[in-house]
Image (tube, rainbow, N blue to C red):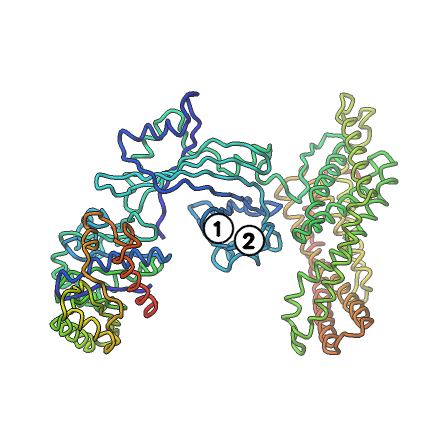
Amino acid sequence: MVQAFSYEFVLTGHDDDQPAEDGALDALVPRFSLVPGGRPRAIRRTWLDTFDWRLHRAGLTLEHTTGAGPGELTLTGPDGERLVARPGRLTWPALAGSLPDGPLRARLRPLIGVRALMPVARGGSAVRDLRVLNADDKTVAWLALDRLSVTYPATADLPSRLTVTAVRGYQPQAERVAQVLGGTPGVEPQGPPPLDAALAAAGRRAGDYSSQINVCLTPAMPASAAVTAVLLDLLSTLEANVPGTIRAIDTEFLHDLRVSVRRTRSVLKLVGHVLPAEFAQKFRPEFKWLGDLTTPTRDLDVYLLKYPDMAAGLVAATPEELHPLHAHLIRSRAAERRRLVRGLRSARFTRLTREWRAALESLQAATQGPAAVPGSAVSGGPDAADLAAASIRRAHRRVLRQGRAITANSPPERLHDLRKRCKELRYLLESFASLHDPATHRRAVKELKGLQDCLGEFQDGQVQQHEIRMFAAHMMSDRNVPATALLAMGELAAQVGLQQVQARSQFAGRFGEFASLATQQRFRTLTAGAAS
Amino acid sequence: MKIFATYNIKGGVGKTSSAVNLSHLAARDGLRVLLWDLDPQAAASYVFRIRPRVKGGGKALIKGSRDIDDAIKGTDFEQLDLLPADFTYRNLDLMLDATKNPTRRLARLLEPLAAEYDVIFLDCPPSISLLSESVLHAADTLLVPLIPTTLSVRTLDQLTEFIAGFDGHRPDVLAFFSMLDRRKRLHMEIAQQLPAERPDVAKTVIPALSLIERMAVERAPVTAFAPRSRAALCYGALWDEVRARFL
């Protein structure tokens, strides 16, 4: 692969009377022969990423340019990685499956998974191309003068950019052009990438959303201030995912929204006692309502995401025989989504988020006031480190106690209860992560996750078997369902049952690892200093 | 990757004009194209305004001491690169003779370019030599420009007989009439008769046109500086025929 040598400059200008572009070109004219390289081009530019910035986190930039010719998708990365695809007509947001088949899609698919690519910035470029000629009037380099205006997420004119690209085999000549430009006042080498500049114009930065809890707690801060900060962060995550859930951009908006609701409920349940008593009384039932509102659509999303693998795994039946189930899932999801969207647009939801934010912010103002020092009248109670240690220790003990009580004959409900305790422990670990040593925290979460995965598979199997029977009953009431579809669903239920048995057989081993002395020691380190 | 070679024992029959214009048309079609100017007279390099010089000369390329990739130059046309001529190419026969397997050497040198180019054109000097034999072994298709005369047709027969004697890989051959003079009755007769009788002779005929000679003045393919001219249309028709048969 031959690397294209190019040099980028930002034209900041130095003279009010002379546009920055003219200054740069005037500096070249005495030494190089410049001629126009075609008509000026107007290019529409859209930068894309997933809502949670998966490409940015992988060091990649994806840009869709459209102009006079066919549109191009260009993926660039560190070390000169560059992949180009011509997507034809494509509207955003789009899932990986909508991209044209080829190396670019193959590179993106594992990174973005089920997330949609959506515009993170938009703009328009007016590009003027110039050719740099040698004594034989041969083009040795191209100059592209790019005036970029951003239209989204805010409107702004960015400084012009000048790119020098060497024609293959003429790198020294292009380098000389770049040297002259580099010594010209008002011409700055490099500058932030256009996407960063576009986002900065809107006061944003790449990577400014993550579904993780992102708070910076200090051990000595009042516990109520720490819990308030965590709950405010969770509320921001919840609110950030509402528009994407309503528009059904991808399934992960609803997933992240649900996780933030579940985390909020767990935090209120496990450490909510450090907040004023009316908080839990008033808001816990409301968050339960919100959680319940989102469950049916998410369950159907999970089914539909797993459907291709489930259909492909059939042995006796054919995937085609399962089509009526797929149609039923699609219909049911559409109906449940309508209910979900109504709920998210309801006065009850608006009131919940508004009042929850107001309550948290007023508490935050009180705990951050001048009297809010540990042990003061306003903060009262324990500090953040004590609360984190005590609550994690309690939750950890509960997991160990319930886990040890599970035998080969325990009913599925016991495993389900243990799964819920594990989730509570996990949410506490995540909420107070900033108080812990990162390496110890990572190991503890990893070990807990191993147990959670096993319990999750078991519980999913339990729920899915029940739901397959329920779907079958609903489909039977339609009367038009073919017998082959019901037989295929029977095979599906058997497969799910088998997976559940496998997960059950792995439980003892997984729990044994989690209950090992080494893991217990790790949790003791995390909860050191807590009162028993 | 497809390798085409414009080849004829005789000089001045339109090899370089064909190589230059066909490679330009292939690049315009979106193919990634390399043209290797193997002729020390460097006419193709001149048309593309590229100086006929390769660091280390032909010897470095043939020996492999210089990476062929480093010698390639971009032309002024998108997707079209050129490996320039060098005056030392006049001794390519001797250089090839010094290698282990001279007739397969060119094919070996071009192998690594398969990932980078869809099509390679070899513009060969007029001769029968070790170099031309190496070209015949490397090429998938020989494009043979012929002046419509009886002797030219005889040359084509000699060439096809020579190739038939190869072991293993034998290139396809497509001859086409070039420099057709409409005032000459014999030219017209042969150019009409032969394509109908022989499948290895293209239907398209390239007339003798002053615009084609102007390429050396304009220093660009006629398909670029006069894309609607008769000359450009004839090369366009020839490219269509080549593409339909071999790509």
Tell me: residue B164, above or below residue A89: below
Q: Residue at x 67, y 48 (%)?
A: A444
Q: Is residue A429 left or right of residue A168?
A: right
Disc 2 is attached to a residue of which chain?
A
Disc 2 is placed on an element classified as: loop
Residue A17 seen in the current view:
yes
Secondary-structure class at tag 1: loop
A29 relative position to B179: left or right? right
Q: Is residue A445 left or right of residue A88?
A: right
Q: Are marks 1 and 2 in contact (CB under 8 Å)?
A: yes
Residue drawn at point x = 36 percent, y = 29 percent: A24
Pointer 1 local density, CA inside 10 Å: few below 14, some 14–19, many at least 20: some
Q: Position of residue B51 (x, y in %)?
A: 20, 46
User: Which of A170/A362 is in front?
Assistant: A170
Question: For the residue marked with disc 1, what is the amino acid?
Answer: Gly
Q: What residue did someone put label 2 on?
A: A90
| For residue A158, above or below residue A321 | above
Residue B12, quarter of the rendered image: bottom left
Question: 10 Å neighbourhood of mark 2: few (<14), some, or many (≥20)?
Answer: few
State the mark number for residue A71: 1
